Image (tube, rainbow, N blue to C red):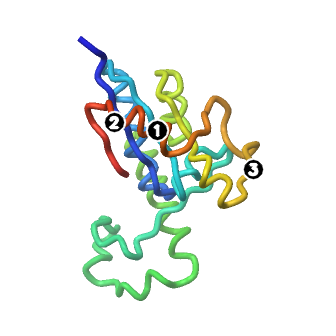
Amino acid sequence: MDEKKLAIIATKGSLDWAYPPFILASTAAALGYESQIFFTFYGLQLLKKKLDLQVTPLGNPGMPMPMGMDKWFPVLGMTLPGMQGMMTGMMKKKMKDKGVASIEDLRDLCQEADVKLIACQMTVDLFDMDSSEFIDGIEYAGAAAFFEFAGESDICLYI
C-alpha cells in the first residue's frame, strides 16, 4: 500500500493562523503521512527566521476574549492603538501557561519529521522578499510543482 499524503496550503501569517499547518503536518508525519506545506502570500511570514507574528481580535468574532470582553467591550475599541500588541501578548502568555509549543518549535518538529516546507517562488518574487530572511531547509517552487504532490494527496487543506 502506498504511503498516505497530506498537502497543506498556508496563506495566513498571523500568530493564530500559524499553528494549524504546523500542528496538522507534524501530526500527519507522526502517523506516517508524507506531508508538504506550500506557503504563499502572507503565509510566507511563517518561514522567516525572525518571527514577529501578531494576533488581532478585530474581524475575528470567534476569538475568546479575556474577562468576557466580547460581551461588553465595543468592537470599535479593538482599533485603539496598542490593542493588537496587548492581545498578542495575552495569547502568547496563555499558550505558554497551557504548555503549547512555540511556532519555532513546531516548525523545527516538522523539519525533523521530513515535512517538506515549500515557499511559493512567485510570491517571494512578487513581494521582493529576500531568501536570506527565511529559515534553512525550505524549498522554492511554483504552484505547478506543488499540484503534482497535492493532486496525488489523500488530504488537501487550505489554511
Q: Quadrant of residue 154?
A: top left
Above or below, 30 relative to 123? above
Looking at the image, tell me whether mark 1 or mark 3 is earlier in sequence order.
3
* Vertical comparison of 147 with 35: above or below: below
Which residue carries the number 2 mark?
Answer: 151
Q: What secondary structure is marked by label 3? A: loop
Asked if labels 2 and 1 touch by Cβ distance under 8 angstroms, the answer is: no
Q: Nearer the viewer, residue 135 or 139?
A: 139
The amino acid type of the residue labelled 3 equals: Asp
Q: Check the picture and name the quadrant holding the N terminus.
A: top left
The residue sitting at 64% across, 46% down in the picture is 48
Q: Nearer the viewer, mark 1 or mark 3?
A: 1
Q: Are marks 1 and 3 in contact (CB under 8 Å)?
A: no
On residue 146, the disc is 1
Under circle 1, the secondary element is: helix
Judged left or right of residue 27, residue 132 is right
Question: Residue 4 appears at what percent x and percent y?
Answer: 29, 22
Circle 3 packing at 10 Å, graded few (<14), some (14-19), many (20+), is few
Residue at image point 47% right, 57% down: 12
Residue 159 in picture, x, y percent from top left: 37, 52
Q: CA distance from mark 3 to mark 2?
A: 30 Å
| Three-letter amino acid code of the residue under disc 2 | Gly
From the image, tell me which residue sits under label 3. 130
Pinpoint residue 152: horizontal percent, then vertical percent. 32, 30
> Tag 2's secondary structure?
loop
First reached walking from the N terminus: tag 3 or tag 2 = 3
